Amino acid sequence: MEVLSVLIDFIVNGREYSIDVESDMRLIDILRYKLGLTGVKEGCGEGECGACTIIMDGEAVNSCLVMAVQARGKEIITIEGLEKNGELDPLQTAFMENGAVQCGYCTPGMIMSAKALLLKNPNPTEEEIREAIAGNICRCTGYNNIVKAVKAASNNIDGGFEEI
Amino acid sequence: MTNLCFFTPNNMKELRQCLSMADESTRFIAGGTDLVIKLRKSSNKHWKLIDLSGMTELKYIKEDENFIRIGACTTFANIASDPVIKRYGRCLSLAASEVGSVQIRNRATIAGNIANASPAADSLAPLSMLGAKALLMDRQGNKTVCGIDSLISGVGKNNLDVGQIILEVFFPANKDVVSSFVKLGSRKKVSISRLNIALAAEYSNGDQKLKNVNVAVGAVGPGPMSAAKSASLLDGRNISKEVIESFSESLAQEVEEAIKGRSSMPYKRKAVMGLGKDLLDDLLSYISALEREECYDR
């Protein structure tokens, strides 16, 4: 029960890992520095900017506010886990097609927040999209194109556009 | 120097064992949304951390004959979306839905918000208005009940003993209680309260009057400040335009008295007037929606 040498088992982007972590490491630290998943960005380190957002057991969380030990037994998805067989996720494509990326620093976190929303609610309203990404700060684009991209992907999340 | 020692209980038996070993260096971590930041800012990292994130037994919202019971590790996301909380503790539901961001609400817990004792904590004023109490357990496994207000001893300080833990928060299941919560922050979303107000009162459909009104203002002191004078202006009266004006004036006076001499006083004195109006606007539209639907299902 007492965790001294911290060995944790968890699943990241569909792959099982069993790794030793230092007790003061956060989830973001092991994702970036132990697993090389540098799409997970650190901005504020205080849960304000959302650049470090990942999906843990189906929920969007700030990986800078989760201690590595707390990720034991969890299933994690990072931006690197969205691509399937060389194909980008529809959400990633929609971000490119709608000009929702400028400097790109907020993009992985933004996409993971949107992905967590779409997994639960495939056809969200604009208000629901804005609420879902309210914890992600973008200092370049001004959000409208990001919302547009999420809307576009919401019709396309399972592979096909809905015809009206 | 870093010296963190984690304990990871997964059930009540293991939790009791962890508590029995607790000392001055012990901290509880659940969602971690406050503690991880403190941990990184602290130079003294010789902490024993009892990680409650595996305690599924402490994640629940239950309704029994007399009380609504919320497990300590229940997240704000769960509280915000729960129909039982919406019906019996609307002010808490509204407050929960405005805590931080989706990411924060998915992790932050009700007991963590209380124990962290931030003056800006969003849940404290609503819990106080709902007459909520906490079920505590000490190192020996003894359980006691304590009012939420008396758990806060100062800015960022609680009255919990070493190794004492909050197991549950509960409040009376009273269908006649209507309540509201409003918050003012520095940005529209994801903000820390500069001010918040919670109100709870008894209301019977039809007579359009509030009874036993209680109002608390958050973020003007270590814990929620009771605004009894202002609340009494609403008691037993129709909420007319004049009553709303005098209520917001009275709130301004109470806030001014509470934080006299502080640099934030002129701002908060003014801001609480608008916030008080928003509070009553919300409450009145909620009540008229109830009446339109001619139902007591709240």
Image: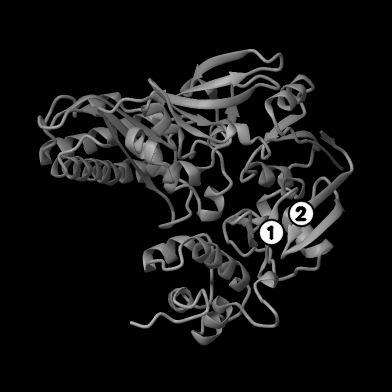
Q: Identify which amino acid the numbered label 2 is placed on.
A: Phe
Residue at 76% x, 26% y: name it.
B18
- Residue A144 location (% of width, % of height): 43, 76
Image position of B57 with respect to A43: above or below? above
Q: For mark 1, what is the residue?
A: A76
Characterize the local packing of mark 2: few (<14), some (14-19) or many (20 or more) Cα atoms within 10 angstroms.
some
In the displayed structure image, the side of residue B292 where residue A61 appears, left or right: right
Q: Cα distance, mark 1 to mark 2?
A: 8 Å
Q: For mark 2, what is the residue?
A: A10
Q: Do callouts 1 and 2 mark residues in contact (Cβ within 8 Å)?
A: yes
Residue at 23% x, 38% y: name it.
B248
Q: Is residue B205 visible?
A: yes
The chain ID associated with circle 1 is A
Q: Toward the viewer: A99 or B61?
A: B61
The chain ID associated with circle 2 is A
The C terminus of chain A: image quadrant: bottom left
**Dot 1 or dot 2, earlier in sequence:** 2
